Image (cartoon, helix red, strand yellow):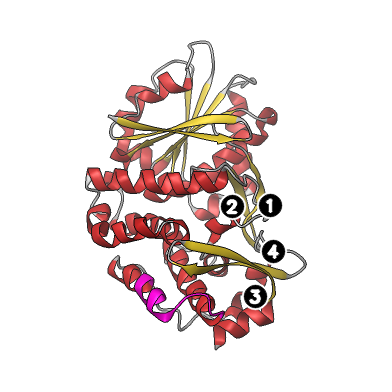
Amino acid sequence: METKLSIKINNKIYTTIIGKNILNKVSKYANFKNDILNIIIIDSKVYKNHKNYINKIFKNKNSKKIIFNSSEKSKSFESYYKIIKKIFYFKPDRKTKIIIIGGGVLGDLGGFIASTLLRGLDLILIPTTLLSQVDSSIGGKNGINFYSGKNLIGTFYQPKLVLIDISFLNTLSKRQIKSGYSEIVKHAVIKNKKYFGWLEKNYNKVLNLDKKYILMAIIESIKIKSSIVMKDEKENLISKNSRALLNFGHTIGHALEASNKYKNNLTHGEAISLGMVCALKISNKLKYISNKKIDKIIGHLKNAKLPTNIESINLNNLKRFIIQDKKNFSNKINFIVLKDIGNSSIEKNIPFAKLNKFYLK
């Protein structure tokens, strides 16, 4: 059994398929043909853990594998060049398909490659982490990092297919599962109060990868994210439904990652958890949300054993990374605040000094 969700962006529709042990569906839905080259770029850890499963599906002579050791630091021009050099060795043409099997880092890098190679090749995403399954594989954002910030170079480029197979999650560490769960909580608090209540009751079953509950969480998060992306693909900040809402917790979370030089002692989800707590504090100082409600959200993050202690976070130390955030213009900050559980909005054009003042109070 699998669930199919159709995502329509700018009159183009692609399918997201969610289920367990469904990798074999990729050939059917991606319309593989014997005379068309498939380039499969696979995270090295994923390939090590699922080699037989992957090889069983991609055994066609026109399926060429590139095994890549990905990490946040690998979202770079150097990695981009290294991979496209290997791809050109296989003589791609404009019918070639790029298939990415890995987490969000490889998905971002692989999507950037697909969007730029020969001015755009068909992209198929097979996300293998909870973080990438609920978040980064949906919406078409691709990119690499620059020294001054995260994802500063990239494209908006939608995949032709996203295939989410939860069997890949079984080899993840608990820490990686919690990192993905941080984004699940974000989706709930920005858009769906009822979903947040469901998570409060069932988070242990989600974190323990109970099939029924993990599938439900992934599907609901994809529905929330895709509903926002379909209204504002390129984050134009033109309405209250802007894609920027998905960046709740990310302005400070991304700054924490960048200032930490993307070291493994802080995962993306952990940074976003801390960023959300900072954003809740600022939302409260702006008189948008009560202490009781932010305590409820922070309490849930604590129950999920995500970090919430922000006492040591000094915004002045993060200033250059915060100002470099892609949502910002003219050194003024567009910051996502929470007005209620399930109700988020954009606070536009805040000078950094004012944001810092609210944070310090």
Real-space Cα separation, disc 4 to disc 2, in angstroms: 14 Å
**Does 287 appear in magenta?**
yes
- The residue under label 4 is 328
> Which residue range is magenta in the image?
286-297
Real-space Cα separation, disc 4 to disc 3, in angstroms: 12 Å
The three-letter amino acid code for the residue at tag 4 is Asn
Q: Of tags 4 and 1, which is closer to the observer? A: 1
* In front of the other: 238 or 314: 238
- The residue under label 1 is 236
Task: Kindly check if marks 3 and 1 are in contact, taking CB atoms under 8 A apart as contact.
Answer: no
The extreme top residue here reads 35
**Does 198 appear in magenta?**
no
**Side (left or right) of 295 relative to 261:** left
Of the two numbered discs 2 and 1 on the same chain, state the one appearing first in sequence. Answer: 1
Q: Of tags 4 and 2, which is closer to the observer? A: 2
The three-letter amino acid code for the residue at tag 1 is Asn
- The residue under label 2 is 243
- The residue under label 3 is 319
Q: Of tags 2 and 3, which is closer to the observer? A: 2
Real-space Cα separation, disc 2 to disc 3, in angstroms: 23 Å
